[in-house]
Image: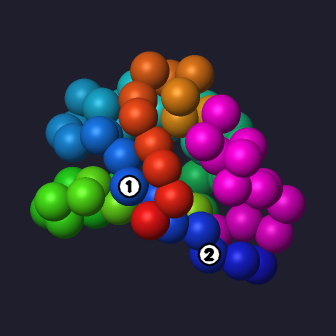
Amino acid sequence: MKTLQFKTNINCGGCIKAVTPMLNQEAGAGNWQVDTANPDKILTVNSAQLTAGQIVRIVEEAGFRIQAA
């Protein structure tokens, strides 16, 4: 299991709700979180299979900006 972190513009409950179905499907429920209190809105993903590129694609397809933290 590796932990990957990204800066995003996921900044509210509605934004989290928008990405939840895709991240739950790909990473699994409970394996990711967004720290909306952090100015960089840090997305942390714990996964043995997903690559950083796959996570970026998932979040961008949901309509959000993302970059490696």
CB atoms of marks 2 and 1 within 8 Å: no
Q: Which residue is mark 2?
A: 3
- In the image, the segment drawn in magenta is 46-57
Residue 40 image label: none
Q: Residue at x 69, y 38 (%)?
A: 25
Q: Amino acid at mark 2?
A: Thr
Q: Secondary structure at mark 1?
A: strand
Q: Nearer the viewer, mark 2 or mark 1?
A: 1
**Where does residue 36 sit, x and y in percent of width and height?**
21, 55
Viewer-proximal residue among 28 and 8: 8
**Where does residue 62 sit, x and y in percent of width and height?**
50, 23
Q: Mark 2, residues whose alpha carbon is within 10 Å: few (<14), some, or many (≥20)?
A: few
Query: Among all residues in the image, which is located at the extreme right?
Result: 49
Viewer-proximal residue among 59 and 20: 59
Q: Secondary structure at mark 2?
A: strand
Q: CA distance from mark 2 to mark 1?
A: 14 Å
Q: Mark 1, residues whose alpha carbon is within 10 Å: few (<14), some, or many (≥20)?
A: some
Q: Residue at x 21, y 42 (%)?
A: 11
Location of residue 69 (image quadrant): bottom left
**Where does residue 28 sit, x and y in percent of width and height?**
67, 52
Location of residue 48 (image quadrant): bottom right
Location of residue 23 (image quadrant): top right
Magenta segment: does it hold 69?
no
Please, is residue 66 above or below residue 61 in the view? below
Q: Residue at x 44, y 21 (%)?
A: 63
Please, is residue 33 above or below residue 12 in the view? below
Q: Amino acid at mark 1?
A: Lys
Please, is residue 11 above or below residue 21 in the view? below
Q: Which residue is mark 1?
A: 7
Question: How is the protein colored in the picture?
Answer: rainbow
